[in-house]
Image: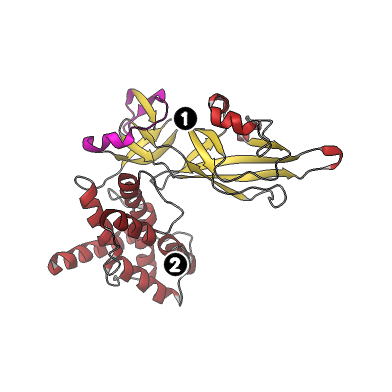
Amino acid sequence: MRKKSFLFVFLLAFALTAAGAAMGQDAETPVQAQDEMDVILYGELGIGGVIQRLGKVETDLFGRELPGSISERQQGLLNFLRDGTLGQPSMIFKTGVAEWAVLHEVRVDLPLSRRVSEIERQLEGAAGEDRPLAMRLERILSLLVPGQVTWQDIRFPANVVFRTSFIDRISPKTAAAGDIVRLRLEEHLSVEGYLVAPRGSRIIARVDRVKPPRSFGRPSEITFAFDRLEPLGPDLIPVFLGDAAVLAGKSDKTIAAAAGTSALGFILLGPIGLAGGFLVKGDAPEIAPGTPLYLETSALANVKAYLVPPAMQGLLEGKSDEGNDAQLQDPNGSTQEGGVKVD
């Protein structure tokens, strides 16, 4: 067993340093790269200098420090954690697949170390925190899915409508233009058996404009501009509030009910200019977490997705509508006719 573990670490270390050399250095400084790794893995910055923090990340992940220069090691680790390499999904992607299989959602606001521990607790009642984190995740996946977890390049269509909800509480009294606003995906997005974004995936918006309550009873106004959906893989999907999303919202009784209450005060739902924004206008003091909203993809997006094994296809079945018919183009340029299933 020890020989197998050592072989795993050795091969992984070689792959990491080779990937780092092939990718080359990016614009990040060593401190910036280390800060990003710490936040991804622990949710906060580490203590000490870059070399000390780098060694801790490697030891926590693999049980030992890896060979190579600082830049090679850092780039290799960022590939391993965030970006993936040729044919090898990132740890973020794999963790998302494991969460989807166990929890039927992803918990992207938690650091990776905690996400893996929570999956272990759900599966086995306790976290194996005395073992290297990367090996723990691989063990989890060996229990959950048949074969190795791989990813595939696909093209996710435009104008796919999906349901979201606000994570953050937004108040006209405290909001300012440029503030980042987070939303949560409330249903799985999949295409022809490929899981693209599980429930719980994050959507990023920003506050575009704020007008507090004014004289003569004029109500407050907040305008939002929607930016992106963050799927399993490192690529992003552009989103907006288009006509189809507005129609879905008006057809949803829960949103229609919310729009008619003073708690939310929606009196205008719809596209605002080319940004596809969202205007909340009324006497409401705030937008509460959990407030529902439909959005849609604004353009065709090249993304990496997980081909769900036949035995697990049932996990893609959900309570949502049947989805929209669309054409899915494979990476070689051919076109497949099929349904785009929004679970």
Q: Which residue is mark 1?
A: 158
Q: Secondary structure at mark 1?
A: loop
Residue 308: name its quadrant. top left
110 is within the stretch colored magenta: no
The answer to whether residue 53 of the structure is visible from this angle is yes
How packed is label 2: few (under 14 Cα within 10 Å), some, or many (20 or more)? many
Picture quarter with the N terminus: bottom left
From what the image shows, is residue 308 above or below residue 89? above
Mark 1 Cα-neighbour bin, 10 Å: few <14, some 14–19, many ≥20: some
Q: Are marks 2 and 1 in contact (CB under 8 Å)?
A: no
Along the polypeptide, which appears first: circle 2 or circle 1?
A: 2
Q: Quadrant of residue 338?
A: top left
The numbered dot on residue 34 is 2
User: What SS does tag 2 mark?
Assistant: helix
Q: Residue 79 or 140: which is nearer the viewer?
A: 140
Q: Could you tell me which quadrant the C terminus lies in?
A: top left
Residue for point 77% across, 38% down: 219
Residue depicted at 65% across the width and 45% down the height: 207
Q: Is residue 280 left or right of residue 240?
A: right
Count of marks overlaid on the render? 2
Name above or below for residue 111 compared with residue 175: below
**One can see residue 78 in this view:** no
Depth order, front residue of 28/229: 229
Q: Amino acid at mark 1?
A: Ala
For this rendering, which residue is in front, 63 or 99?
99
Residues rendered magenta in the picture = 309-337
Which residue type carries mark 2? Answer: Gln
